[in-house]
Amino acid sequence: MKTIIITGATSGIGLETMRIFTNLGYVVIGIGHSEKNCEIAKNDILAANPTAQIIFYHADLMQRQETLRIAEEIKAYFDKNQSNELCALINNVGCVRSWYMTTEEGYEQQFALNHLAGFLLTYQLLSLLKKWKGKILITGSESHKGIKMRWDDVMLRRGYNPLTAYKQSKLCNMLFAKGLNDRYNSYGVQTYVIDPGLVNTDIGNKKTGGIVNLVWNLRKRYGVSPTVPAKTYAFLCEKNVTPNELYYHACAATSYSKEVTTENADRLFALSERLCEISYGKREGELI
């Protein structure tokens, strides 16, 4: 049975993407922040599609131990349901913050949730993705353009700016995807980043305040419904798209930042592996 995993699945783009895939007949595993939100989302989907095959897990993916816990639960699910094929992992969860805030490990929260959560979860599920030649889809943003990695202060501890932190985390999404393709395209595992554009969701209103909350309240009015970008995730999973394309918007490949290089991807991989205490291994052609 074709199976999809979606993080950040209880609202916005994640919820609408779940809805699309259940309507296409997939088994969909959603990960949400709280048990209450998961239950609300599950009931919402089932009310419109009583035959939907959905499973929800709840975890605070911002925290390393929570990500490891949920990965083990998902692997146990696949061990028990061996007819299920993991077609795609959709790393969609993300956040915006108004102030400098850290995780239990001391990592800046936008960097932790927007990048490290997907980095660690993908690693934990990599054997399943390789087994079924599953795709990895990452929710990115056009805001990754026009910024460089702050390698000397990735957590932006000095002079924190919430917009800079968000933009850098979205550049991390691009570099992560580039690094994954450099390492696993030969295994049939393809990674893509989706630019959803401006979408009317509450991402800028969750645990924010002040100017960030105000600006997002104004901006989101001009955003499209989350059902619009959700179609691109389905497009990438359902179609045989060109493997060497990396970045998609509205079901079409588009241009991305010149900062997305193998050199920068390797540097981010090395840093992220150290922070997550894991090792993906060398990419093809990389010197030992």
Image (spheres, grey):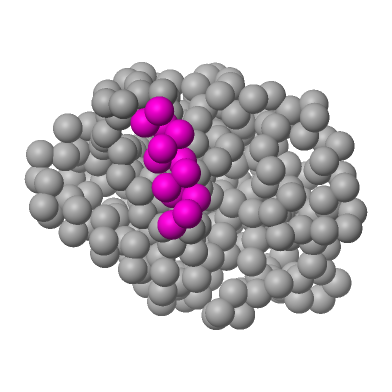
Asked whether the viewer can see residue 192, the reply is no
Question: Picture quarter containing residue 42?
Answer: top left
Q: Foreground: 23 or 7?
A: 23
Rendered-image quadrant of the C terminus: bottom left
Residue at image coords 31%, 38%: 54
For residue 267, side relative to residue 151 (left or right)? left
Chain part drawn in magenta:
35-47
* Majority SS type along the magenta span: helix
x, y percentage for residue 223? 74, 28
Magenta highlight on residue 65: no
Across and down, in percent, residue 36 comes to 47, 54
Which residue is the extreme one toward the bottom? Answer: 105
Residue visible at 88% across and 58% down?
210
Taking 192 as reference, is 264 left or right? Answer: right
Residue under the image location 37 percent in, 72 percent down:
278
The N terminus, quarter of image: top left
- Residue 28 lies, in percent from the top left, at 32, 37
Query: Residue at 54% across / 19% down in the picture?
Result: 252
From where the camera sits, is residue 2 visible? yes
From this view, report whether residue 222 is shown above or below residue 95: above
In depth, the one of 36 and 138 nearer the eye is: 36
User: Which quarter of the picture shows residue 187?
Assistant: top left
Q: Describe residue 26's horizontal placement relative to residue 208 as left or right.
A: left
Query: In the rendered image, which quarter is residue 273 located in?
Result: bottom left
Given residues 132 and 71, the one toward you in this image is 71
